[in-house]
Amino acid sequence: MNPTLTKIALERMEILIKNAISNARTDPELSQRYGQLARRLASKYNIRMPYGLRIVFCKKCKSFIAPGINSTIRVGRTPVKSIRTTCKFCGHTYRKIIPK
């Protein structure tokens, strides 16, 4: 794959996700569309999405979830500290363990 195409696709994915997050409250359908386009770019050019972009997608239903708008984010109170994200579309909860 051409490195310039990869770089352009990554930049476009970042722009799409940034716009999707900013439009999540005012126009949720548009933000879902931006999320779908970003995922399609990653699959078309066979690029692994960076972690910062990957965390705004539900791992079960693959829909775009804006933090705090159509997802719930909580810090776990167990001995193993973790960030729990719950998708409001499918109800799936997934955890990111916080290292000590």
Image: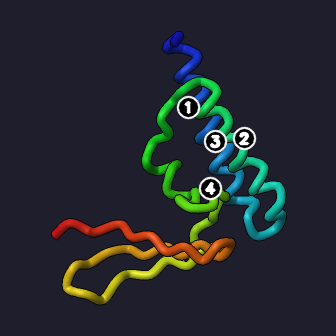
Q: Nearer the viewer, mark 3 or mark 4?
A: 4
Compare marks 1 and 3 and give the one earlier in the sequence.
Answer: 1
Pick the quarter of the image with the C terminus: bottom left
Mark 2, residue position:
37
Q: What amino acid type is highlighted by mark number 1?
A: Leu
Q: Tell me the element at label 1.
A: helix
Mark 4, residue position:
62
Q: What amino acid type is highlighted by mark number 3?
A: Arg
**Residue 68 seen in this snapshot:** no
Determine contact: label 1, label 2, CB under 8 Å. no
The residue positioned farthest toward the left in the image shown:
100
Q: Nearer the viewer, mark 4 or mark 2?
A: 4
Q: Tell me the element at label 3.
A: helix
Q: Tell me the element at label 2.
A: helix
**Residue 32 seen in this snapshot:** yes
Question: How did the renderer colour the structure?
Answer: rainbow
**Distance from Cα at disc 1 to Cα at disc 3:** 11 Å
Q: Nearer the viewer, mark 1 or mark 2?
A: 2
Residue placed most toward the observer, 32 or 22 = 32
**Distance from Cα at disc 4 to Cα at disc 2:** 12 Å
Q: In the rendered image of this protein, does residue 91 appear above or below residue 10?
A: below
For residue 73, side relative to residue 95 (left or right): right
Q: What amino acid type is highlighted by mark number 4?
A: Lys
Q: What amino acid type is highlighted by mark number 2?
A: Leu
Determine contact: label 3, label 2, CB under 8 Å. yes
Mark 3, residue position:
39
Q: Which mark is residue 10?
A: 1
Compare marks 4 and 2 and give the one earlier in the sequence.
Answer: 2
Task: Residue at 64%, 50% (x, y): give it.
Answer: 18
